[in-house]
Amino acid sequence: MEVGLAEPGDATPYDAATFRRQLEDKLTAAAAAADAGYPDNEGLVIDPETGIPSLKAHRSEGQRSSAKALEQELKARMPERSLLGIISRTAYWVEWWRRFGPASGNEPKLKDPFGRYVITTFVKGTNMGPYEAARHIPGVSGHELSLAANRHFSIPTLNEAIADLVNAHARLDISQAWGDGSTVAADGTHMDTYLNNLLSETSVRYGKPGGIAYHHISDTYIALFTHFIPCGVWEAVYIIEGLLKNTSDVKPTTVHADTQGQSFPVFALAHLLGFDLMPRIRNWKDLTFYRPTKRTEYVHIDALFGEPGRNVIDFDLIESQFRHLMRVAVSVREGAISSTLLLRRLRAGSRKNATYTAFREVGRVIRTVQLLRYLSDAPLRRRVTAATNKVEAFNGFSQWIGFGNGGVITDNDPVEQEKTAKFNALLTNAVIFHNALDIAEIVRQLQEEGHVIDAEDLAHISPYLTEHIRRFGEYSTHELGLEPEEYDPHLDVDFSLLRGDGPGAGGYGQAA
């Protein structure tokens, strides 16, 4: 089926009754499992009066001593790099720079497109102004850099270049230490803009004016997609949009988000499009659990659902609106309607509209299922926390790279603001890719010296390393003419244990 809800290999026509049965089975099974497992769930306590659950904080065992030793050795051996050198080498290897060029065939081509596109990406990715950057880079002028950024780079081509680096990163054996690409975490980070900016608003969440760089970060640490959005919008609508616009070969099926991702319409649309949305839950006080029928009661967890007979899913409505739900889901997947536009309309929708209420009911089912899973599965909670920690770490890493102008976006044009966020994501991905290569090379050196490298130790090593990178000073362009040797994507380390293929598997998502 086009929206991915039919079971693989099932030739039975997928109809309204099947869709209803799937949802009923999901909710019934999740609630039964949570109820049966409650007596042994030492981390969960449900207040019998209010029905509000509370989870005991998980005490992390911390990084293994062997992982700490490996991390220290890696940091000590990481070769000193310049940002300009890093991005130049990745341009030679991955050839992401070939995505760019003049928008019109009538414009004159650049004499040295490789050098100009690499330098422009460095300047815009670090958020330096072109004229300020030209004072530190010999052989280029501010006018040339500004012209290249405005006329040779576009939002679609920046997305393509970002995807090129994502694909190259996924082909590295070392990336298996961190994940398999099936999971992504989505979150935003505040970016300052000028106060007289049309998109500049004061964010209730961040408490200051500006915009939001909204990232989708793979479990392998690299950014799949980046938006720049105004502070006044509802961030959750971009959770699905980034997944649909991701053009890389890495296609995650599970998405984690912070509290922004807990609304009914987002859960409903994620389910209809075949994504498993599992946000990190922090506040349980205002969350409602829904029963499959009025007569359903539970031995241990009944207080979660409120008074008996209340908070019941209207499966009849869902079944009656099946065709409308499927039509909307297909339209979103095919790009006929934007997921952000749809979710905004659903959020402000009329309760008298049957399609709106059907979306709400589907969202209630899926959110209840996911909340029950979250309460019942401690390892799942740790994976969600690890995933959201990765996106928070990426935010800090990308801001470290985008050091120019004090982190303030100086463009007032919304298109240029979006491009600035994507330039930064492109440069950040290049550094992540290059760091991964350097880590892999050091691992090979250690193995040649007789060290045994454990895959679980590597899983605790983040590629967000900065100590070896030079950001400041005069930016020499001599490295642009130094074509590097081919890199080795392979690593003689058994990562199968991290996937649960053998005894002692710890699973992905351990590193923060």
Image (tube, helix red, strand yellow):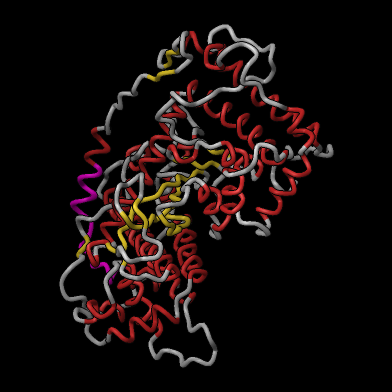
Pick the front one: 93 or 348: 348
Please say if 468 is above or below 125: above
Please say if 86 is above or below 111: above
Q: Position of residue 374 (x, y in %)?
A: 49, 26
In which quadrant of the rendered image does the C terminus lie? top left
Q: Quadrant for residue 65, please give it.
A: top left
Q: Farthest left residue? A: 473
- Does 278 sit left or right of 389 as displayed? right
Q: Residue at x 51, y 51 (%)?
A: 238
Pick the front one: 315 or 401: 315
Q: Residue at x 79, y 37 (%)?
A: 10
Q: Quadrant for residue 434, please give it.
A: bottom left
Q: Look at the image and give the residue range highlighted in magenta.
A: 70-86
Taking the magenta stretch, the answer to whether it contains residue 76 is yes
Q: Quadrant for residue 489, please give it.
A: bottom left
Pick the front one: 14 or 46: 46
Taking the magenta stretch, the answer to whether it contains residue 232 is no
Q: Position of residue 217 (x, y in %)?
A: 43, 50
Observer able to see residue 491: no
Q: Position of residue 332 (x, y in %)?
A: 66, 53
Q: Residue at x 58, y 38 (%)?
A: 267
